[in-house]
Image: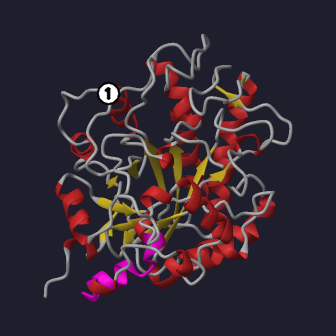
C-alpha cells in the first residue's frame, strides 16, 4: 500500500528537512515552575508524543518577565532556563522529530496578579474586550519597546543554544505582536502606531532581530516561523484583508506561516459573504513562497488530507495528540482502529498528561476534548473563536 502523501518528507527553503508533514500544535500545559523553568511532568508529556510528528511546537514561552501571561507558563527570558530548555529540546528530538520553541510576550493578556504586582503592558493603555474584567495595561515607552525586541532576539539565541531546530513567533491569539498590529489595541500616535504600516513596525522589528540572531549564532538550518490569527471580532480590529497584507509583508522574511484557527474548515467570521476557507485564501498568498501550516480540529487522516488539498503544506494536530500520542505511528502502520478518538479521565495519567493540565482540560476544554463521560456533542469551532485562539482568559 502506497504511503500517504502527508507521511512523506518535507524540506523547508532553508534546507531543514522534516520526516513528514505532521506538526504537533503548541498547547498550554500550565505545568512549568513558578519562575518558568521546565518540570519533569512537562518533559514526560512531550517525550510521550515525540518521535511521530515531523516537528513539534512547544507551549508558549515568554521572552520577558513582563510578558508572562498565565501561571505555569514556560520561560526563555533568562540564561538559567537553558539547562531545562536543553532537556526539553532533547526530549522532543527523539527519532528525528524537530523541536520548535514558540515564544511570545503576552502584553495586555495578563494581569498584576500573574505579574506579581506589576501592571501589564501593551501598545496603548486600552484593556482587552474579553474577559470582561481585563485590566487596563500601561502603554509601553519607546525604550521598553526596543528592550522587548531585544528580548525576542535573546530568546532566539537561547533556543539555538538549547538545541532547538527553530522558534515560532506567536503573533496570534491577541498577544503583544498582534496587539501592536491591531487598530483596536494600538492607538499610539508615535512611530509605532497610527497607520497600518506603522502598526506593523513592531512585528517586523521582532522578525528582523530574530533573523539577525539566527544568522549570527546558528550553525545549522534553524527556522523562524510566525503564527497569525486571521481576524479579530472587535471593531475596529484586524480584518482578513489586514492579515493577508501582513502575510505579504513578512513572507520573504520568515520560514513558514502558521494559522491559529479552531477549525480547518473556517471561513471568515466577519464577512458571511466570503465563502472560501481561510486556509485556501492564505495559501493564495504563500503557495510556492513559504510553507503554510493549516490547523483546527484535525483528528483523522482524512482531515489532514482535506486540509492539504485546501492549500496547507503542513498540518498541525493539537487535541488529538493529547488523546493519542502515537497518532502518526498508528496511521503509518495502518493501525487505525486502535487510535483513540475519545479520552477517558481514567487514562490521563497513562497518557502522561500533567495533573494541572488535566484540570485545565476538564474545566476549559471539556466540550471539545471528546471525554468519554461527556454526554453532549462536542463544540464546533467552524463558525466561532475557540479558547485556544485567545477568546477566553487562561485560568
Which residue is located at x 37 percent, y 37 percent? 230
Q: Residue furthest top?
A: 189
| Residue 164 as seen in the image, left or right of residue 324 | right
Which residue bears the numbered disc 1? Answer: 270
User: Image quadrant for the N terminus?
Assistant: bottom left
Label 1: few (<14), some (14–19) or many (≥20) C-alpha neighbours in 10 Å: few
Q: Is residue 270 magenta?
A: no
29 w.r.t. 188: above or below: below
Q: Is residue 59 visible?
A: no
Label 1, secondary structure: give it.
loop
Question: In this view, which residue lies farthest toward the left?
Answer: 1
- Of residues 200 and 343, the one drawn nearer to the viewer in this rendering: 343
Check the image and report above or below for 63 versus 351.
above
Residue toward you, 12 or 63? 63
Does 68 sit above or below residue 188?
Answer: below
Magenta range is 321-336
Residue 385 percent across, percent down from the top left: 41, 41
Q: Residue at x 44, y 69 (%)?
A: 55
Q: Identify the image quadrant of residue 67.
A: top right
In the depicted view, which residue is nearer to us: 341 or 118? 341
Q: Position of residue 102 (x, y in %)?
A: 56, 55
Please identify the dominant SS of the magenta region: helix
Residue 367 location in percent, x, y?
45, 56
Count up the numbered dots.
1
Which corner quadrant of the image does residue 86 belong to?
A: bottom right
Amino acid at each position: 500500500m502506497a504511503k500517504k502523501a502527508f507521511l512523506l518528507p518535507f524540506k523547508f527553503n532553508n534546507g531543514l528537512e522534516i520526516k513528514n508533514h505532521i506538526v504537533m500544535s503548541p498547547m498550554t500545559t500550565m505545568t512549568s515552575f513558578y519562575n518558568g523553568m521546565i518540570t519533569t511532568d512537562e518533559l514526560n508529556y512531550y517525550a510521550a508524543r515525540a518521535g511521530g510528528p515531523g516537528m513539534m511546537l512547544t507551549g508558549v514561552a515568554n521572552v520577558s518577565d513582563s510578558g508572562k501571561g498565565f501561571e505555569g507558563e514556560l520561560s526563555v527570558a533568562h540564561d538559567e532556563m537553558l539547562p531545562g530548555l536543553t532537556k526539553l529540546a532533547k526530549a522532543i528530538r527523539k527519532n528525528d522529530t524537530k523541536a520548535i520553541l514558540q515564544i511570545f510576550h503576552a502584553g495586555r493578556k495578563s494581569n498584576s496578579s500573574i505579574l506579581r504586582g506589576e501592571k501589564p503592558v501593551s501598545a496603548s493603555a486600552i484593556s482587552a474586550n474579553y474577559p470582561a474584567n481585563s485590566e487596563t495595561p500601561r502603554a509601553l515607552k519607546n525604550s521598553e519597546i526596543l528592550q522587548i525586541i531585544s528580548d525576542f532576539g535573546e530568546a532566539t539565541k537561547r533556543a539555538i543554544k538549547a538545541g532547538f531546530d527553530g522558534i515560532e513567533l506567536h503573533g496570534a491569539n491577541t498577544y503583544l505582536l498582534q496587539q501592536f498590529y491591531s487598530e483596536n489595541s494600538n492607538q499610539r500616535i508615535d512611530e509605532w502606531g497610527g497607520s497600518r504600516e506603522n502598526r506593523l513596525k513592531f512585528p517586523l522589528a521582532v522578525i528582523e532581530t530574530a533573523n539577525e540572531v539566527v544568522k549570527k549564532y546558528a550553525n545549522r538550518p534553524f527556522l523562524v516561523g510566525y503564527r497569525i490569527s486571521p481576524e479579530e471580532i472587535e471593531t475596529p480590529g484586524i480584518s482578513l484583508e489586514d492579515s493577508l497584507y501582513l502575510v505579504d509583508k513578512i513572507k520573504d522574511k520568515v520560514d513558514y506561516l502558521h494559522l491559529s484557527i479552531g477549525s480547518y474548515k473556517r471561513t471568515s467570521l466577519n464577512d458571511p459573504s466570503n465563502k472560501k476557507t481561510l486556509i485556501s485564501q492564505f495559501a493564495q498568498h504563500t503557495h510556492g513562497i513559504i510553507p503554510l501550516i493549516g490547523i483546527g480540529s484535525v483528528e483523522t487522516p482524512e482531515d489532514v488530507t482535506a486540509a492539504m488539498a485546501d492549500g496547507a503544506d503542513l498540518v498541525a494536530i493539537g487535541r488529538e495528540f493529547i488523546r493519542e500520542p502515537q497518532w502518526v505511528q498508528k496511521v503509518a502502520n495502518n493501525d487505525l482502529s486502535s487510535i483513540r478518538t475519545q479520552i477517558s479521565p481514567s487514562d490521563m495519567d497513562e497518557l502522561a498528561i500533567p495533573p494541572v493540565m488535566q484540570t485545565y482540560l476538564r474545566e476549559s476544554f471539556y466540550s471539545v476534548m471528546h471525554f468519554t463521560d461527556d454526554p453532549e456533542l462536542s463544540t464546533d469551532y467552524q463558525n466561532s473563536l475557540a479558547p485556544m485562539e485567545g477568546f477566553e482568559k487562561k485560568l
